[in-house]
Amino acid sequence: MSEENKQSIEPTRNGPYLVKNLQNFKNSKNEDIKGNPVMSLCRCGGSNNKPFCDGTHMKNSFIDTKEDDRVPDKLETYEGEKLTIHDNRGACSHRGHCTDNAPKVFRMKVEPWIDPNTQDSDDTTKVIKTCPSGALSYTKDDVLSKDWDREPAINISKDGPYDVVGYI
């Protein structure tokens, strides 16, 4: 893809995401959303034209600084016999792909919350690769696996966050 047609998403200061050349844009029902080569997506939550920005951020005092009580951006490691799982709670979007699809490994309300030894490691790595935020990664046979090559896409949740995947 040429540089001028490269897909990208960039946050603007205290404003919307500026999205360029996105080919895969879907709603919560997995239906295609018609977009434009350049579009502004709401980040403030106040737009009357969601997911698109309507300028409301200028009226509702939206600021994009991180909250002081935000979960720190820190990698935790959970070593297993065949698989080591890495988790960054500060990057997690809390969509539940891991807890829904591998509940024996990613355990709610249990510490440690990740146990790499409770399921076949190949099945676990398949689930890790579905993590929409990239908070999860793994090491197997001394090889770190992260940032998988996925088709760039933005999936819009109903009244929720954007799932952004791929190198956008």
Image: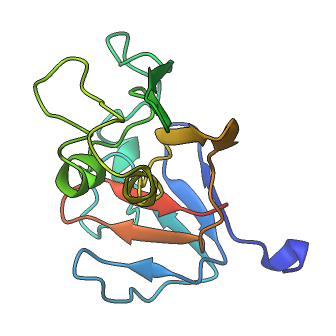
In the picture as drawn, the residue positioned furthest to the front comes out as: 81
Q: 31 above or below 25? A: below
Q: How many marks?
A: 0
Q: What's the image's color scheme? A: rainbow
Q: 98 above or below 164? A: above
Image quadrant occupied by the C terminus: bottom right
Query: Between residues 159 and 28, which one lies in front from this camera angle?
Result: 28
Q: Which residue is drawn at 23% across and 57% down?
A: 101
Image quadrant occupied by the N terminus: bottom right
Q: Position of residue 65 (x, y in %)?
A: 47, 24
Quadrant in the picture for residue 67: top left
Q: Position of residue 147 (x, y in %)?
A: 63, 51
Q: 30 above or below 139? A: below
Q: Residue at x 64, y 82 (%)?
A: 37
Query: Between residues 109 and 70, which one lies in front from this camera angle?
Result: 109
In the picture as drawn, the residue positioned furthest to the left comes out as: 109
In the picture as drawn, the residue positioned furthest to the top comes out as: 68
Q: Is residue 151 left or right of residue 120?
A: right
Q: Where is residue 20 in the image (x, y as percent from the top left)?
A: 66, 71
Q: In this view, does 23 lie to the left or right of 121?
A: right
Q: Residue at x 33, y 68 (%)?
A: 156
Q: In this view, does 7 lie to the left or right of 16?
A: right
Q: Which residue is drawn at 60% across and 63% down?
A: 166
Query: Between residues 164 and 54, which one lies in front from this camera angle?
Result: 164
